[in-house]
Image (cartoon, rainbow, N blue to C red):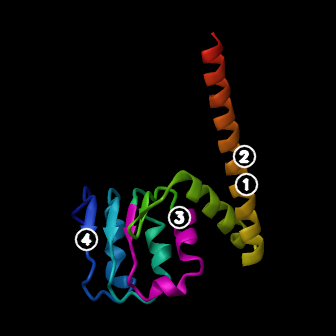
C-alpha cells in the first residue's frame, strides 16, 4: 500500500483478516476516506487506535468483527474519536449524534463512569431540543410577521 498515496477507497471486507498488524499498511494511504473491514476476524480493540490515525477517514465498516463487542460504547467511541467520520457501519453520522457522542466520551475520558456519561449526553440532548424549539419558534414568528404585513 506504500505506493498508493492517492488511494481513497479500500474494500477488504470478508477476507479473514485477523489482526491489527494485517491492516497497518492503511496508514501509508493518507487520502483513504472509505475503509471496509467488515466481517473479518479482527479481535483486537486496538484497531480503533489504528483507524483514528487516518486523517481523511469518512466511511468505516467494522461490523461483523469480534472486536466490535470488545469496544465499550462502540458507536459513540468511534464517532467521538474520529472527527472526520460521516458514516459508520451502514448508518450515517449526523451532527447531533456526534455532539452527543462527544459529550458522552469526554466524560469517560475524564475518568467518569457510564452513568455520568449518560447524564452528560442527556444534557446535550436537552440543549439540542431547546435549540430546535427556539429555531421553530423564530421561524413561526417570522411567518406570522410576514402574514401580518
> Real-space Cα distance between discs 2 and 3?
23 Å
Q: Pointer 4: what residue? A: 11
> Real-space Cα distance between discs 3 and 4?
20 Å
Between discs 2 and 3, the one toward the N terminus: 3
> Real-space Cα distance between discs 4 and 1?
39 Å
Please say if the residues under marks 2 and 1 sit with CB atoms less than 8 Å apart: yes
Q: Which mark is residue 126?
A: 1
In the rendered image, residue 49 lying in the magenta stretch gets the answer no
Between discs 2 and 4, the one toward the N terminus: 4
**Front-most of residues 17 and 64:** 64
> Real-space Cα distance between discs 3 and 1?
20 Å
Please say if the residues under marks 4 and 1 sit with CB atoms less than 8 Å apart: no
Dot 2: what SS?
helix
Please say if the residues under marks 2 and 3 sit with CB atoms less than 8 Å apart: no
Q: Which mark is residue 130?
A: 2
- Say which quarter of the image contains residue 17: bottom left
Dot 3: what SS?
helix
Q: Residue at x 59, y 77 (%)?
A: 73
What is the magenta range?
A: 59-81
Residue 106: x and y in percent read: 69, 65
What residue occupies the far top of the structure in this picture? 149
Q: Pointer 3: what residue? A: 79
Amino acid at each position: 500500500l506504500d505506493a498508493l498515496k492517492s488511494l481513497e477507497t479500500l474494500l477488504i471486507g470478508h477476507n479473514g483478516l485477523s489482526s491489527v498488524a494485517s491492516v497497518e499498511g492503511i496508514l501509508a494511504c493518507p487520502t483513504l476516506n472509505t475503509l471496509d473491514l467488515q466481517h473479518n476476524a479482527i479481535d483486537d480493540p486496538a484497531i480503533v487506535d489504528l483507524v483514528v490515525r487516518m486523517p481523511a477517514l469518512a466511511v468505516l465498516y467494522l461490523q461483523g468483527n469480534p472486536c466490535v463487542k470488545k469496544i465499550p460504547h462502540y458507536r459513540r467511541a468511534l464517532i467521538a474519536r474520529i472527527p472526520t467520520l460521516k458514516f459508520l457501519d451502514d448508518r450515517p453520522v449526523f451532527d447531533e449524534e456526534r455532539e452527543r457522542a462527544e459529550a458522552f466520551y469526554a466524560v469517560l475520558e475524564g475518568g467518569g463512569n457510564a452513568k455520568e456519561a449518560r447524564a452528560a449526553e442527556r444534557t446535550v440532548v436537552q440543549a439540542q431540543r431547546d435549540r430546535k424549539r427556539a429555531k421553530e419558534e423564530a421561524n413561526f414568528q417570522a411567518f406570522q410577521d410576514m402574514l401580518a404585513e
